[in-house]
Image: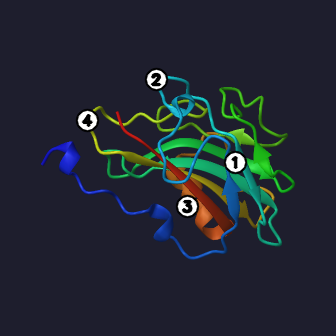
């Protein structure tokens, strides 16, 4: 079976326990449409602008992630993880995922993506592979801190979120070479 014939992975967020949804929008990502060149690994690695509203009452912090379930691995690929965003945060500007986190509000930090850097890594599907989906998700968290540190893996971060997610806002773009 070639990569083009490989079945698409399920939407991972539909497999998690149900939580209230809220709204996430972007000036850079259009639901279900190809990502802009800025959000591609070889052309920019610039995190998109994201805004969110109507988070559930009792939200004490946020986590923002970008995940590709279609990567040719059993575990997908984490492109971006921003942890411990203060509860009064309602947006991130384009480029907030740059190495060093200078565009993040106080107290927030990034975990190392699956490419090895604590920054946003743009779309990078293998040439000729099927279109990949990039899920930009804002997780409303029921605690002020997720209780992890900058050396935590994406899998462990996600495990901790499973028990502290008060709501979830999902936006996805696509990309193929």
Q: Which mark is residue 83?
A: 1
Q: Which of marks 3 and 2 is in front?
A: 2
In this picture the colour scheme is rainbow
The secondary structure type at the circle numbered 2 is: loop
Q: Distance between the residues labelled 4 and 2?
A: 16 Å
Q: How far apart are marks 1 and 2 (CA)?
A: 25 Å
Q: Nearer the viewer, mark 1 or mark 4?
A: 4
Question: Within 10 Å of the Cα at label 4, are there few (<14), some (14-19), or many (20+) other Cα atoms?
Answer: few
Point out which mark residue 119 bears: none
Percent of width and height locating residue 81: 61, 44
Which element carries disc 4, helix, strand or loop? loop
Task: Tell me which numbered mark, 4 or 2, is placed earlier along the sequence.
Answer: 2
Q: Specify the quadrant of the image occupied by residue 105.
A: top right
Residue position for label 3:
159
Task: Report the side of 48 relative to 155 (left or right).
Answer: right
Circle 1 Cα neighbour tier, 10 Å, few/some/many (<14 / 14–19 / ≥20): many
Report the Cα–Cα distance between label 3 and label 4.
32 Å
**Residue to which mark 2 is pinned:** 42
Q: Residue 128 carries which label?
A: 4
**Is 86 drawn above or below residue 21 in the view shown?**
above
Q: Distance between the residues labelled 3 and 1?
A: 13 Å
Question: Is disc 3 in contact with disc 4, using a CB cutoff of under 8 Å?
Answer: no
Q: Which of marks 3 and 2 is nearer the N terminus?
A: 2
Q: Is residue 163 above or below residue 49?
A: below
Q: Distance between the residues labelled 1 and 4?
A: 33 Å
Q: Do the residues labelled 4 and 2 touch (CB within 8 Å)?
A: no
């Amino acid at each position: 079976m070639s990569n083009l014939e490989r079945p698409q992975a399920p939407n991972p967020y539909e497999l998690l326990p149900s939580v209230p949804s809220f709204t996430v929008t972007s000036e850079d990502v259009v639901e279900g449409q190809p990502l802009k060149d800025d959000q591609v690994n070889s052309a920019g690695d610039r995190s998109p602008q994201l805004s969110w509203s109507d988070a559930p009452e009792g939200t004490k912090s946020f986590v923002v992630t970008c995940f590709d379930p279609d990567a040719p691995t059993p575990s997908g690929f984490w492109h971006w993880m921003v942890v411990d965003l203060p509860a009064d945060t309602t947006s991130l500007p384009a480029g907030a995922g740059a190495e060093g986190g200078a565009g993040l509000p106080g107290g927030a930090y990034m975990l190392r993506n699956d490419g090895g850097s604590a920054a946003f890594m743009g779309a990078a599907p293998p040439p000729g592979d099927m279109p990949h989906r990039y899920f930009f998700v804002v997780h409303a968290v029921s605690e002020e801190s997720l209780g992890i540190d900058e050396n935590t893996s994406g899998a462990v971060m996600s495990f901790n979120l499973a028990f502290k997610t008060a709501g979830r806002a999902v936006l996805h773009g696509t990309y193929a070479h």
